[in-house]
Amino acid sequence: MKMAALCSEFGDLAQIKKQLISVISLCKERGLLHSAKWASELAFALDPLPKDNLPPEPAFTEEDAQDLDALTLAKSYFDLKEYDRAAYFLKGCCSQKAYFLYMYSRYLSGEKKKDDETVDSLGPLEKGQVRNEALRELRVELSKKHTARELDGFTLYLYGVVLRKLDLLKEAVEVFVEAIQALPLHWGAWLELSNLITNIEMLKSLSLPDCWIKDFFMAHMYTELQMIKEALQKYQNLIEAGFSKSTYIISQIAVAYHNIRDIDQALALFNELREHDPYRIDNMDTFSNLLYVKVSLQLHAFVSDENFVSFKGNYYSLRSQHEKAALYFQRALKLNPRCLGAWTLMGHEYMEMKNTSAAIQAYRHAIEVNKRDYRAWYGLGQTYEILKMPFYCLYYYRKAHQLRPNDSRMLVALGESYEKLSQQVEAKKCYWRAYSVGDVEKMALLKLAKLHEQLNESDDAAQCYMLYIQDIFSCGEQLEHAEVSTALRYLGQYYFKNKLYDEASLCAQRCCDYNDAREEGKALLRQISQVRDQVETPSADLFTPLSNNNTPVRRVSPLNLISFTP
């Protein structure tokens, strides 16, 4: 298909609008509803065109005329999801449009049969064995056409999808790039390609057409690759270019803030999105997860809408009704078997129910839908941790860490796996890195301190416990934090052994604030009282130099507890 020259800049928004209107029509004719919806939402964000400026109807060939009746009949069956019936009446048609719909109907028929078997047999072992039986035949036929250069942009896209489904990923990438070059305005091809790009180097190596839609793709890829600063800048540029009314861009910015755990900003954007589009379903699973994290009563507002079954699942999960939550996630999957959030959340529910086999399969399905879903990789690591298989844990936690390199939870999980495998040096590095990037759960320093303690590295253990307590107090955490008493107990004994009796006394007094450490605190105070009259107390000084190990703990002065009043 030949279209008007694509704008590489955003200066002519009227031309962009015309291109969007044209591609909407082309996608609708071929049953590519999601691409048509994306383009329609984008076109809606731009100003209307006057009647005389609307794009002309696409060219109608002799082949199109011959296939018109069969195509019209088959498209009516296709719209009713009678894919086999549609394919039957399109067999033998010659036009590009009819050929695409013929092959696409066969593909969707196979997918529908596979999905029916997959969701109806939610047993943990059978699901991974279900396949689309039509894929191999489609590949053979499309390959011949591809070699003869008889495929247009839409059919190239379908060929790429078939290759991806058959796990021929390298070939799929090449075909998707070819499809994008042939038809740059088909958003579905860009999205399929995005699912196969694993890192920024691979992204830069691709030969993609230089047109305005590439900016949307790059912003999407930056979000997927966790390059959030670059993604937000791209989306801001798109807003300034004239897409300020785009609900798609608002939702993508909200997802970007969700990815960096800026929950308040993400929620504010999702609430703004609901004002513009109150019945929107796209990305609402992310909104639901944010509300879940905030334990907000707003979540209850969704549970009466039968279309939001995933929200019902989150609602029942919040109430610890895990069996009921899993049931609603299964219902969500019957509506959309490629719903990433439902597979991942169902895995979490199976974990809560101690059904590890089903959890593993649910997480694996989530990864099939999107290999960059760190939650699924992390969930697999947790599942194998329950099964006491640390080598498997390490593999899956590494995958999660690669996707979220600055997420302390992944680093702490990696450290625990290394520790179980007696790789203490690597465990120390992971715990320290988790603290350095911002430990959201306040556990990294504690685990690092305990590891030093087990290895009899008392100076390093003391410094980690000290940093842990300072971190807890400086963040405004309550002194009833579970492990503060453990840290105070150790520091009290450490200072006492090093004859720093003032600091030891302070720690012992603080120990008396905790039930589990009160007696030890009193005993230490008595010991200090006994020796103070006999030994002159050394002045408080810096810790002795660190032992020669791989933990880059910084040198700090003895803990000042006086300024932190509970």
Image (tube, rainbow, N blue to C red):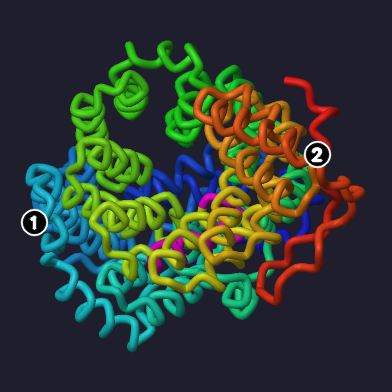
**Pointer 1 residue:** 126
For badge 2, the amino acid type reads: Arg
Q: Of label 1 and label 2, which has the lower sequence position? A: 1
Q: 332 left or right of 81?
A: right
Q: Residues within 10 Å of mark 1 (few under 14, many from 20)?
A: few
Depth order, front residue of 71/209: 209
For badge 1, the amino acid type reads: Glu
Residue placed furthest toward the bottom? 147
Q: 369 left or right of 358?
A: right
Depth order, front residue of 461/550: 461
**Pointer 2 residue:** 532
Q: How many marks?
A: 2
Mark 1 and mark 2: Cα distance apart in space:
71 Å
Q: Residues within 10 Å of mark 2 (few under 14, many from 20)?
A: few
Chief secondary structure of the magenta portion = helix
Task: Locate residue 293, reporting x and y percent.
Answer: 50, 28
Q: Residue at x 78, y 58 (%)?
A: 9
Residue 546 drawn above or below residue 496:
below
Task: Locate residue 275, reporting x and y percent.
Answer: 59, 17
Q: 211 left or right of 306?
A: right
Task: Locate residue 562, reporting x and y percent.
Answer: 83, 28
